[in-house]
Image (cartoon, grey):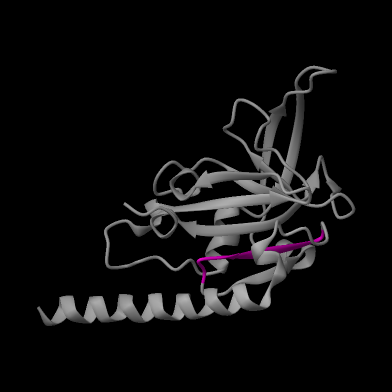
């Protein structure tokens, strides 16, 4: 009983800290309410996280880099094979310290990651899709395309397991980490 109470107390403290951070972020960051239409070389990472931040290309390059060779459909020229390099979406989200409710089993399965581009288009992936403990689908922010830096064009979200190009968006301007239980009631 005492261990269960300690676990509940720790979860409540973690959630309280996350709520305080989310409230402060919402009150001080205009991009939180909007689409995150900042510079294509700076990406806002926020949502239900303990450490919201804005990451530059240099900071994204400091994260572990991964490469992915994929075929991208091109309606004019047919399928094109390209190699992209950059940090995994999972690593970026984890660096912001998602506010998982540790009082429930597998809390990360209730989380999603929404990625915005400059014009407001938003695409979503579930946490389970990108976490190697579950589905381990490759999703990353490409900082280079075939060895050429994308600094002037902005980072691109790439999802190597998708059969179509719907979630290949750029320039990425915001990554929102959220808990579906806090968004949907009932």
Q: Is residue 115 left or right of residue 82?
A: left
Q: Residue furthest front?
A: 186
Q: Identify which residue, 33 or 19, lies in the foreground.
A: 33
Residue 177 is a magenta residue: no
Q: Is residue 186 left or right of residue 150?
A: left
- Which residue is drawn at the image coordinates 9% and 78% (left, top)? 1
Image: magenta residue range: 41-49
Q: Is residue 52 above or below residue 74?
A: below
Q: How far across and how far down the image is residue 57, in percent?
A: 78, 62
Q: How far across and how far down the image is residue 114, in percent?
A: 59, 51
Q: Is residue 169 above or below residue 36?
A: above
- Which residue is drawn at the image coordinates 76% and 33% (left, top)? 82
Q: Is residue 69 above or below residue 55?
A: above
- Which residue is drawn at the image coordinates 59% and 31% (left, top)? 162
Q: Identify which residue, 16 or 102, lies in the foreground.
A: 16
Magenta part mainly helix, strand or loop? strand
Q: Is residue 1 left or right of residue 112?
A: left
- Which residue is drawn at the image coordinates 58% and 80% (left, top)? 24
């Amino acid at each position: 009983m005492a261990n269960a109470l300690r676990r509940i107390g720790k979860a409540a403290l973690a959630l309280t800290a996350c709520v305080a951070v989310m409230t402060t972020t919402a009150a001080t960051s205009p991009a939180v309410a909007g689409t995150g239409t900042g510079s294509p070389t700076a990406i806002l990472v926020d949502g239900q996280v303990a450490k919201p931040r804005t990451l530059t290309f240099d900071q994204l390059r400091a994260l572990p880099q991964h490469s992915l060779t994929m075929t991208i459909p091109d309606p004019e020229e047919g399928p094109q094979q390209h190699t992209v390099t950059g940090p995994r979406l999972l690593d970026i989200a984890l660096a912001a310290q998602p506010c998982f409710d540790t009082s429930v089993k597998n809390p990360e399965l209730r989380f999603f990651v929404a990625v915005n581009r400059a014009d407001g288009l938003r695409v979503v992936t579930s946490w389970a899709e990108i976490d190697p403990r579950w589905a381990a689908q490759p999703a990353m922010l490409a900082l280079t395309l075939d060895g050429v830096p994308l600094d002037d064009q902005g980072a691109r979200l790439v999802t190597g397991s998708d059969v179509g190009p719907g979630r290949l968006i750029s320039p990425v301007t915001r990554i929102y980490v959220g808990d579906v239980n806090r968004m949907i009631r009932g």
